[in-house]
Image (cartoon, rainbow, N blue to C red):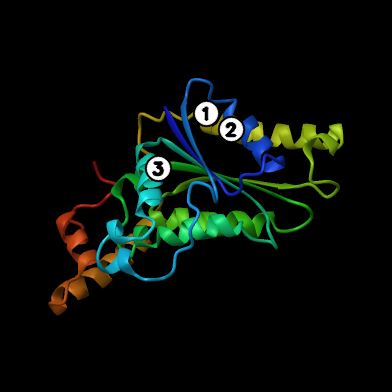
């Protein structure tokens, strides 16, 4: 089993500790981790090269290509981020911006429809839910249906060892419960694509069919055509 982990910060704080507890339930897994912003240090500048010319034309392709390859080869994707002003870290947002070309209306990777993902967030007070929503939004538009969410609220301190024993125990039990649920999955079988994901895909397909009929097909449309998605093929059918 292969697990790809993207950490939204390089800090080894509470979010990092929760992620480590989660991964302890996958002792035999091959785990590859990325830490942001170190492993993707640049912002997306909105040049649209990935959309119009192909992702290999992105100025940050050397970083994005390595991360994407790991994501596609993985069986489980784990994304972590503490809440920064009630949302994901700027480094995580910058990475997700780089993968705009993999959103369903453009060129979604068919492998993503088979995958599972977990989002781990925590905050001091409020903001965990809006943070996990930031990340889940992108994951779902990549085509992933099975997404587990962990939201932790600290309320007292931002340092793990300074949390009360009762609080550490509660957080540990909660993250282990999620981990066990995902550890029990048979990863030899692809994840089930939910109806809502299929509806989004069909809606995007209708748009691409109209583009095809217009005679001005671009890179995205050619991608859909070559995958057979404008006909009867679907990324969740094997």
> In this image, 166 relative to 231: left or right?
right
**Could you tell me residue 197's position as x and y percent?**
39, 56
Where is the C terminus found, in terms of image quarters? Answer: top left
**Which residue does the numbered mark 2 point to in the structure image?**
179
Crowding near the residue tagged with mark 1, few <14, some 14–19, many ≥20 C-alpha atoms within 10 Å: some
Q: Horizontal placement of 206 versus 64: left or right?
A: left
Foreground residue among 113 and 216: 216
**Is disc 3 surrounded by few (<14), some (14 to 19) or many (20+) residues within 10 Å?**
many
- Say the numbered circle drawn on residue 71: 3
Kindly tell me whether residue 59 is visible in this rendering.
yes
Q: Circle 3 — which element?
A: helix
Distance between the alpha carbons at the discs numbered 1 and 3: 18 Å
Query: As displayed, is residue 66 above or below residue 143?
Result: above
Does dot 1 land on a helix, a strand or a loop? helix
CB-based contact (under 8 Å), mark 1 and mark 3: no
Residue extending farthest to the bottom is 214
Res. 190 image quadrant:
top left
- Residue visible at 47% across and 57% down in the picture: 96
| Mark 2 or 3, closer to the camera | 3
Label 2 or label 3, whichever comes before in sequence order: 3
Q: Residue at x 85, y 32 (%)?
A: 165
Q: Marks 1 and 2, Cα distance to the nearest angstrom?
A: 6 Å
Q: Look at the image and tell me in which quarter the N terminus lies.
A: top left
Residue 49 shown left or right of residue 25 in the figure: left
Image spot of residue 95 (x, y percent): 48, 56
Q: Residue 158 carries which label?
A: none
Q: Quadrant of residue 180?
A: top right
Question: Mark 2 and mark 1 in contact (Cβ < 8 Å)?
Answer: yes
Disc nearer the start of the sequence (1/3): 3
Mark 2–mark 3 Cα distance, whole angstroms, equals: 19 Å
Q: What element carries label 2?
A: helix
Residue on which disc 1 sits? 183
């Amino acid at each position: 089993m292969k697990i790809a982990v993207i950490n939204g910060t390089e800090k080894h704080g509470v979010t990092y500790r929760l992620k480590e507890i989660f991964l302890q339930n996958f002792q035999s897994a091959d785990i590859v981790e990325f830490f942001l912003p170190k492993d993707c240090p640049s912002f997306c500048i909105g040049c649209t090269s990935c959309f119009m010319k192909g992702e290999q034309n992105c100025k940050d392709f050397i970083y994005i290509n390595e991360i994407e390859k790991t994501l596609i080869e993985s069986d489980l994707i784990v994304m972590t981020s503490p809440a920064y002003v009630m949302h994901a870290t700027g480094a995580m947002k910058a990475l997700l911006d780089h993968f705009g070309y993999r959103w369903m209306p453009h060129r979604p990777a068919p492998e993503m429809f088979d995958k599972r993902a977990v989002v781990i967030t925590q905050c001091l007070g409020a903001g965990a839910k809006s943070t996990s929503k930031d990340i889940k939004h992108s994951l779902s538009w990549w085509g992933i249906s099975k997404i587990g969410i962990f939201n932790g609220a600290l309320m007292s301190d931002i340092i793990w060892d300074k949390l009360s024993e009762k609080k550490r125990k509660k957080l540990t039990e909660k993250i282990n419960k999620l981990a066990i649920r995902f550890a029990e999955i048979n990863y030899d079988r692809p994840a089930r694509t939910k109806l809502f994901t299929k509806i989004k895909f069909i809606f995007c397909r209708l748009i691409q069919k109209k583009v095809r009929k217009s005679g001005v097909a671009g890179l995205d449309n050619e991608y859909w055509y070559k995958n057979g998605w404008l006909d009867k093929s679907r990324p969740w059918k094997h």
